[in-house]
Amino acid sequence: MDFKKHITLRHLLLDNKKYIGLQFYSDKVLNALIRELPGLQWSEEYSMYYIVNNSNNLTSIFTVFKGVAWVNGKYFFGSNRSKNLDEEFDVSWYKKRALPDDYRACPPCYLQKLELKKYANNTVKAYVSCFERFINYYKGKEIDTLNEFDIRRYIQMLIQKRHSTSYINQAINSIKFYYEIVLGMPNRFYEIERPRKEKKLPVVLSKEDVFRVIASTNNLKHKCIVSLLYSAGLRRSELLNLRPENIDSKRMVIRVVGAKGNKDRYTLLSKKLLVDLRLYYKEYQPKEYLFEGMKGRKYHANSVFKIVSSAGERAGILVKVSPHVLRHSFATHLLESGTDLRYIQMLLGHNSTKTTEIYTHVATNNFDTIKNPLDL
């Protein structure tokens, strides 16, 4: 087989009928073979050949090109993005809501598909909120009749109202989820443009400011929470999922289980923090999770955010201090102290050093050798 020759399969929806789109670079052999497919047609709009989407035609594609070209089904068959999350799917908030009479709620099939795909509860709330805002923007239209023009006009409205790039992308994802996943129309909206990703540098505190924030906490429990976020470079969700047995005082590491991307990793355990954690454990006696709220339940994410931001305000920090600011500060301070970028990547749980490289733009150790022209 010549792997330089390949056919990419795409989902096409034309006049509400499903087709298999076939993309390839023009080639004498492929041009001749493709004409053997039954009911072959050409789309000027998408610049590709297509045939009716059914099992017989799909089999024909693999038969016709067998031994001649590689059939790429990545975009056609998709991938399983299910997550093995350590949390129970909870939509009680959805059922308890008091909605206006004219409000159009998210279809139950949308929630059902989110549950089957094992989306995180926070993602479910965000998707439902974004999708409901979209369908209520078009109250006079049936949901299933909305098209690319309607979506593009809606996204344009969000841009004009100065919503963030991340919110707009989440809105697009929530809309695509309904039409492509719930209704089974993959890649229906080829032409929906996404706003360019903003390239913002992370907010980083100095070591002195971090210590002031820790010193401004109200009690031992809050002190341990803030110290852990900084000294281990944890995400807020990772801190909330920690269990007492994840603290390994013999090896001086913390095991982070089921983090972003469903990955486990180890990160650093501070000697100073270990002293406070032992005192905290004796006083609070957590059972299932390291930090627990009322009735032994997992501590709430909003509570963690409030603890950190309030400590930052009391410490007189001018920027808004959040759990992620502490994580950014952890990575930057390690880089400034000479830690190899690959180790920082491992401690943070990044898939690629490209993600971690952003801290090279905020680390100040490289500036030490540069003389400011005003001081010359």
Image (cartoon, grey):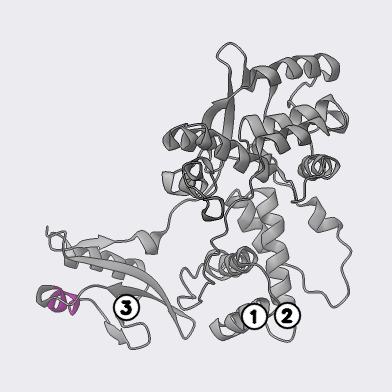
Q: Secondary structure at mark 2?
A: helix
Q: Evaluate if marks 2 and 1 touch, with contact meaning CB atoms under 8 Å apart.
A: yes
| 174 is higher (above) or lower (below) than 13 | above
Name the spot of residue 95 as percent of width and height, x first. Answer: 82, 57
Query: What residue sits 79% from the left and 42% below the top?
Result: 312
Left or right: residue 150 compared with residue 77:
right
- Going by the numbered disc 1, the residue's amino acid type is Tyr
- Going by the numbered disc 3, the residue's amino acid type is Ile
Tag nearer the camera, 2 or 1: 1
Name the spot of residue 186 as percent of width and height, x first. Answer: 47, 68
Q: CA distance from mark 2 to mark 3?
A: 35 Å
| 364 is higher (above) or lower (below) than 75 | above
Query: What residue sits 52% from the left and 30% below the top?
Result: 265
Left or right: residue 346 compared with residue 35:
right
Q: Is residue 254 magenta?
A: no
Mark 2 and mark 3 lie on one chain; the one further toward the N terminus is 3
Write the start and end of the magenta stretch as one range.
30-36
Q: Secondary structure at mark 3?
A: strand
Query: Which residue matches tag 3?
Result: 51
Query: Which residue matches tag 1?
Result: 154
Q: CA distance from mark 1 to mark 3?
A: 32 Å
Query: Which residue matches tag 2?
Result: 137
